[in-house]
Amino acid sequence: MKETKAFVFSPLSEVLNEYKIPTTIKDEIEYKQVSVRLYGNGVSLREIQKGTEILTKKQFLVKSKTLIYGTQNLARGAIGILPDECDGAVITQNMRVFEISDSISPKYLEFILQSTKFVSFVEELEHGAARAYIYPASFLPIQIPLPPLKVQNEIVEKIEKQKQIIEGAEKIDVGFSVDQFIDTNYGEEFIEKLAQVDGSPVKDLSKLMSETYVGGENIESGSGRLLNLQTVQEAGIIGPSYEFKKGHVVYSKVRPNLQKCFFADFKGVCSSDIYPLKVNDELVLPKYFALTLQSKFFAKKTESFQDGRSGMPKINQDQLAQIKIPLPPLEAQRQIVEKLDRQMQALEGVRLLKSEAERRIEEILAGVWGE
């Protein structure tokens, strides 16, 4: 054992005992199968299959309230406590299961083993290998902080409170949709009368290396929020791209069901699979036009142009021009945009709460590790 400023450390072998009950899959029996999700997202029942559908016949039985991890994905957070629904499930030898000592809280153990510090230990075990297998002989000697049970439970309670904030914020975020701002009671107008693609793809980007680059992966589906932006140079872009200007509505033509579109309040460069649209602001406000193209309502309208297409679904300029959207008077559009802006500000506040709760969990766990 070793000690830090925080708590006594003990090897996992003192609190875990490997649980192995071999079984042979029988064709006529139905079996539960387990999913150990990555990045600390827990364990769940994946599916129930008849033995005839399971190719690997030599497997192992598991029981609820034991610890399970994936030998190939431990450094990617594939570890957690088996819930009651997984009791009696079967697993292959690529997963390992352990009974948990009474001296440690299962939830405390789960939080510790999903922490950044623990992941760093596992990464060291991999010695730079792409996805090395971590077997119990390497796993069980790892030492973790082991405070008294009373303190463990207090730590769990603090983390659970932060997780409640995160779950609440995620429900609000997932529940948000721009479709609530679409009013189909107004007459519709063809997009060709409202906006046109502005410019053509630029082949030589040498003079645009310091501009902000936006690819499809940088646009959040259904909201227009931009994520993880880089310059053209940082993103390593060399192929043809469009320039977009401040005030453009920027719409991804690839997989239009993903609803990737944003209103540009800055100039930059976007993928050649994304259209920079110049809006006729005498008929439609750019922000109203953008929210319409972000909606499920609009994605549904693109489906008829994708029928029978092989490969990656796309919508070309002519097809886009022939889609109709509801067009309220400008004043009504302005009111819709103002309401959307207020809700987006509130949503950013919710996201901030979530990120603060995630940061607080990291702080709590870092303190337990003595950092």
Image (spheres, rainbow, N blue to C red):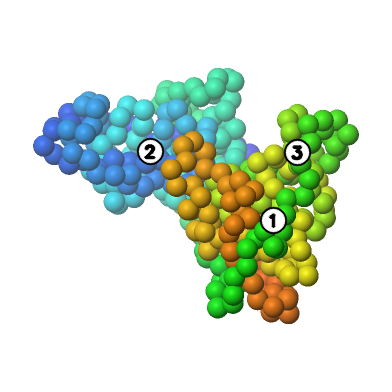
For residue 262, the mark is: 1
How packed is label 2: few (under 14 Cα within 10 Å), some, or many (20 or more)? Answer: many
Quadrant of the rendered image containing residue 371? top right
Viewer can see residue 52: yes
Write the residue at 34% across / 50% down: 83
Write the residue at 65% across / 41% down: 273
Q: Which residue is mark 2?
A: 68
Quadrant of the rendered image containing residue 209? top right
User: 128 or 145, which lies in front?
Assistant: 128
Write the residue at 29% across / 34% down: 91
The type of residue carrying mark 2 is Ile
The type of residue carrying mark 3 is Pro
Instruction: Tell how many labels.
Output: 3
Q: Relative to 264, does residue 27 appear above or below in the rendering?
A: above
Sequence order check: which comes first, mark 1 or mark 2?
2
User: 203 or 178, which lies in front?
Assistant: 203
Q: Relative to 83, does residue 284 appear above or below in the rendering?
A: below
Could you say where residue 60 lies in the image, as x and y percent from the top left?
A: 25, 32
For residue 250, the mark is: none
Sequence order check: which comes first, mark 1 or mark 3?
3
Query: Is the C-beta separation of discs 1 and 3 under 8 Å?
Result: no
Q: Which residue is mark 3?
A: 201
Query: Is the C-beta separation of discs 1 and 2 under 8 Å?
Result: no
- Disc 1 from disc 2: Cα separation: 42 Å
Q: Dot 2: what SS?
A: strand
